[in-house]
Image (cartoon, helix red, strand yellow):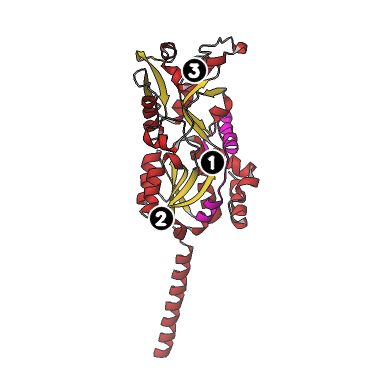
Amino acid sequence: MKKYLMVILVGIILISTVITGCGTEEEKPTLKFSDLNWGSAHFQSEMAKIIAEKGYDYTVELVPGATIPLTQGLRTGDIDVMIEGWYQNQQEAVEAGIAADEIEMLGYLNDDNWQSGFVIPTYVIKGDTARGIDPMAPNLKTVFDLEDPEMMALFANPENKDKGLILNGPPGWECEIVVPLQIEAYGLAEEYDTLNAGSSEGLFASLKSAYDKGDPWLGYLWGPTWIAGALDLTLLEEPAFDEDVWAENYACGWPSVDLFVAGHSGFSDTAPDIAEMFGKWKLDTATLDEVLAYMYETGGEPIDAAIWFLKNRENIWTKFVTSEAAEKVKEAVADM
């Protein structure tokens, strides 16, 4: 009898061990991805969430925020992955994180983007005969031309008529720091105020409203964005980017930027399949412009754009993932 009880006990222990072991193998950690506050980053975060969840069986939480706090969150481990960081804009913090073994680079998604704090509608210089708009500042070519009192009056601050106004990006973006320092370095601090837009959407709305009315507008913008592709805009000339000048006082054009995906240190061990995916993640500016234009034209949200892209651009995203994950994602989005 004792012998039979012992056999039964051993069997129960073995079954329990097998069940427990299977459960452990199937469990995957919840991953926290950044949800940075501009259109192309929103879209990519939503798409990465769908792929990680439907293709690789992870649970993903999107953490919204601006560049500076989410970079810090990446260093501390409050988020696992930052999607579409702009490397040269965050270089000091990112390199410090890498040196401290807090950040690991996972991949680079493109380097054909641009940004400037001195963008105007082209009709300000050339006019637009089709819309009955006469040139307002035909001699305006460079940032240094903004010192002319007539330019200051053209771009007048409605809250302070004695100065011009340059609309800047949202708080927490690198441009919040850089553009005012550029204005000072270019000798324009006495002539121009800056105002931070509340969001990227607010920045676009300000430009689109002025453009539709044929009014002057001066401010910060970048690409990829839907609005840069939809409107005829001109970047005022600045001194060419110089690394030493940029480091001293930002008195030159913005550098070309590498858009990156980075993980908190150890992410490649925590989720090696997702780390491998981000290493292959490539989306050029033309592709992102197409996605952003789709969002604008349809009034869709980033999640809608992600689903549309997964359904209609399989030739692009399937290169990032395993064939098994691709099939699982295709099946999942077919019902979305």
Q: Nearer the viewer, mark 2 or mark 3?
A: 2
Q: Are marks 2 and 3 in contact (CB under 8 Å)?
A: no
Could you tell me how far apart the alpha carbons at marks 1 and 3 are, in whole angstroms? 30 Å
Q: Quadrant of residue 270?
A: bottom left
How far from the left and from the top, in percent, is residue 158? Answer: 38, 14
How far from the left and from the top, in percent, is residue 243? Answer: 44, 38
- Of the numbered discs 2 and 3, the one sitting upstream in the chain is 3
> In percent of the image, x 55 and y 19: which residue is there?
122
What type is the residue that disc 2 sits on? Ser
- Of the numbered discs 1 and 2, the one sitting upstream in the chain is 1
Which residue bears the numbered disc 3? 210
Q: Are marks 1 and 3 in contact (CB under 8 Å)?
A: no
Q: Is residue 124 left or right of residue 62?
A: right
Q: Which residues are magenta?
A: 274-302
Quarter of the picture holding the N terminus: bottom left
Q: Report crowding for label 1: few under 14, some 14 to 19, many 20 or more residues within 10 A (C-alpha).
A: some
> In percent of the image, x 56 and y 53: which residue is there?
55
Disc 3 secondary structure class: helix
What type is the residue that disc 3 sits on? Ala
Q: Report crowding for label 2: few under 14, some 14 to 19, many 20 or more residues within 10 A (C-alpha).
A: many
Q: Eyeballing the image, is 87 above or below 154?
A: below
User: Which mark identifies residue 202?
Assistant: none
What type is the residue that disc 1 sits on? Asp
User: Which mark identifies residue 265?
Assistant: 2
Disc 1 secondary structure class: loop
Could you tell me how far apart the alpha carbons at marks 2 and 3 are, in whole angstroms? 45 Å
Q: Quadrant of residue 184?
A: top left
Q: Nearer the viewer, residue 76 or 3?
A: 76
- Of the numbered discs 1 and 3, the one sitting upstream in the chain is 1
Could you tell me how far apart the alpha carbons at marks 1 and 2 are, in whole angstroms? 24 Å
Which residue bears the numbered disc 1? 111
